[in-house]
Amino acid sequence: MTNVFAIPHHENGAASGPQPAGRAQFEQAGHEQAGHEQVVFCQDHRSGLKAIIGIYSTALGPALGGTRFYPYGSEDEALADVLRLSAAMAYKNALAGLDHGGGKAVILGDPAQIKTEPLLRAYGRFVASLGGRYVTACDVGTRSEDMDIIARECRWTTGRTTANGGAGDSSVLTAVGVMHGMRAAAEHAWGSTSLQGRTVGVEGVGKVGHRLVGHLIEAGADVVICDVSPAAVDAVRARHPQVRAVADVEALVAEKLDILSPCALGGTLNERVVDALTARIVCGGANNQLAHHGIEKLLADQGILYAPDYVVNSGGVIQVADELAGFSFERARAATEQIFVTTGKVLAIADADGVPPSVAADHLAERRMAEVGRLRGIWLGTMGSA
């Protein structure tokens, strides 16, 4: 097992090091200016493991974020993803009220081809070597059963199966949280939390999207879906025959929508999509929905209300964070319901300050990271000198 390269960390984290840059500024920054506390490249020749762990900030506590297992085109592409995702987790965890900083990991390769017990256990040993600075969980390409295997080597693992004392599938509360965020956005836009009769386009009906569709149907919404997987579309329509399906996101955006809900991989909202969009609200479960910096202003200029993804999709991380204290679904669900309050607060601040909601959310998260991080830094410094 070889630790190929690591950017060293500061013991007091972001409280004594560089303060976190806003996510918008982060998107424009090069890797050297990204402001991460630590980035670790991991390689195990025997199992074929190649992974990167990114720790953006521990200002609020140990970094928490999932492990993405994905066939990246290059190591540079994987590095860019882990840097972007770990920064987003810092903001998500801060806005969710969690005592966790932001981290993320990626394993390079096709999980259908190379995922094995030896590889996952080797990865677990790398996470363990960080001594609790990073707590891992599920993401694209990993499941609760994988976390059970990783946990055999590393106690800083969450999102395990219920049979092993874990919280299980985190998509359950992710979808619940998106619904709360969507209701808050509806109230802000239309003066009512009701989604009855609203047309909602859901891009991606995988782990989160298919659950969200069920909640929307229960709320009386008309739902249109698309997914790159015909099987995923068929499964949703078998359960909910009233749901309409279209070929792709371009066809979805061409529909007369009230709400667009991106629930696939990131980058859905680019200039072409925004120009074609008739929806009044964008609110979904996908991470990093904005293709690049500047899209948030384009949305605002066109009168489209964007509920920031890292505000509304935090139900999953709330769920797995609760596992670390001995999982209670009721407690985690109650915390997830606060997404309604947080979303409303972000949208109100955006209006008052005349800024896009994502900028307002950044400022709110940064304030908490700075204030709590400063207090933790003072306490850690006092303990260190005692």
Image (cartoon, helix red, strand yellow):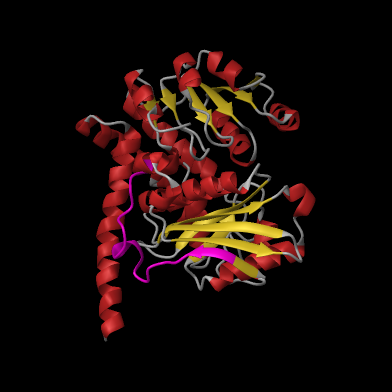
As drawn, 51 above or below 305: below
Q: Which residues are magenta?
A: 4-23
Q: Nearer the viewer, residue 324 or 136?
A: 136
Furthest toward the left, the residue is 352
Q: Quadrant of the C terminus?
A: bottom left
Between 77 and 99, the one lying in front of the other is 77
The percent coordinates of residue 319 (x first, y second) are: 51, 55
Judging depth in this view, the residue of 167 and 378 nearest the camera is 378
Quadrant location of the N terminus? bottom right
Residue closer to the observer: 158 or 187: 158
From the viewer's perspective, tell me whether residue 199 is left or right of residue 360: right
Residue located 32% across and 43% down the image: 362
Rendered view: 346 above or below 369:
above
Please name the predominant secondary structure of the magenta segment in the image. loop
Residue 277 falls inside the magenta stretch: no
Q: Position of residue 348 (x, y in %)?
A: 26, 34
How many numbered markers are drawn?
0
* Residue 227 in view (yes/no): yes
Determine whether, in the image, residue 344 is placed left or right of residue 210.
left
Q: Is residue 15 magenta?
A: yes
Q: Position of residue 247 (x, y in %)?
A: 67, 19
Q: Which residue shows up at 69% across the image and 67% down it?
A: 121
Residue located at (48% from left, 25% from top): 270
Q: Residue furthest bottom?
A: 386
Residue 160 picture location, percent across and down: 63, 61
Q: Is residue 149 visible?
A: no
At 31% from the left and 58% from the top, the residue drawn is 18
